[in-house]
Image (spheres, rainbow, N blue to C red):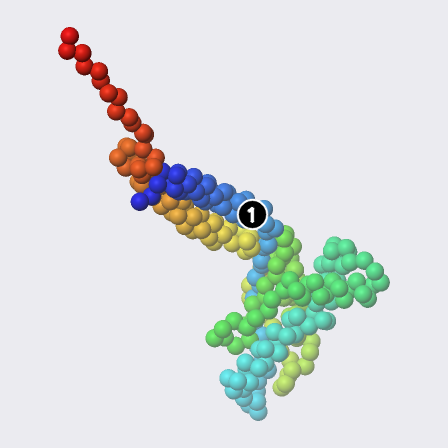
Amino acid sequence: MITMKKSTRLIILGSLVTGLAVIVFILGTVVTFSMRKIYDAHAMVQAIFPEDSRIKYTAQSLELLTQTQVQLVLSKPVLQETARKKGLVKKWSMAGPENAAVNRCCQVLKERCRAVPVPKSVGLISIRVFSTNPTEAADIANALAVTYRDFATSQPQQGGTCRVTVINYAEPALAPCKPNVPFCILISSVVSLLILIVGLLLLFRGYRSRPRNQGDLPRSTRTATREVPVNFDPR
């Protein structure tokens, strides 16, 4: 049997756990909206490899050529020219000697860029740039795509010159890609709900097991009563 003292402890514990659920939800929401917002921008380029009657590419060789072009997108010459076009050394406040500042700028730019081949395609490359400023992300993605196009068409490839076309220019994103606000709010809600359920179960158990009358109390906690003798006078 659950004593009155234990039922009170369950009620107090359930109240604390229920309050914790509210705090977790509020804290998760505040942290989500206070995180630094990161925007991304996408540009798409199409590389067409030279081919004539003497050169026939297999599927494996085309895949290797596409991977080579992906590496060329993020190569140092392309990154340096992109940084020069957009004035990123000055814009990002890269201090120090010119060569060292340019190298650091290219390293930061490379970390903010992604170039991957589009699955089930030949020579189609997706260029993605991340920034806290959506307009900056789109400008850099477009500059990188154009710089790669100009650089690739000027470099001799096997069998001739590779032709590159920018088929999709990037536009500023309307919403950040990080943090994923709906997902973070969902996680906070699920965790808070689980904690709330535990708290409510504790409250339910505490209130249900609470003694309602003296008959439900243990013998040691019942109110002591004494029989008082009544003096009967027959007169």
| Image-based side of 52 in relation to 224, left or right | right
Which quadrant would the C terminus be assigned to in this image? top left
Coordinates of residue 42 in the picture (x, y in percent): 57, 61
Coordinates of residue 38 in the picture (x, y in percent): 59, 54
Is residue 18 among what the camera can see? no
Quarter location, residue 208: top left
| Image-based side of 201 in relation to 30, left or right | left
* Residue for point 72% across, 71% down: 76
The count of marks equals: 1
Coordinates of residue 39 in the picture (x, y in percent): 58, 55
Coordinates of residue 135 in the picture (x, y in percent): 62, 53
Residue tagged by mark 1? 31
Quarter location, residue 155: bottom right
Q: Is mark 1 on a helix, strand or loop?
A: helix
Closer to the camera, 187 or 96?
187
The extreme top residue here reads 235
Kind of residue sitting beneath label 1:
Val
Is residue 199 among what the camera can see? yes
Closer to the camera, 10 or 150?
10
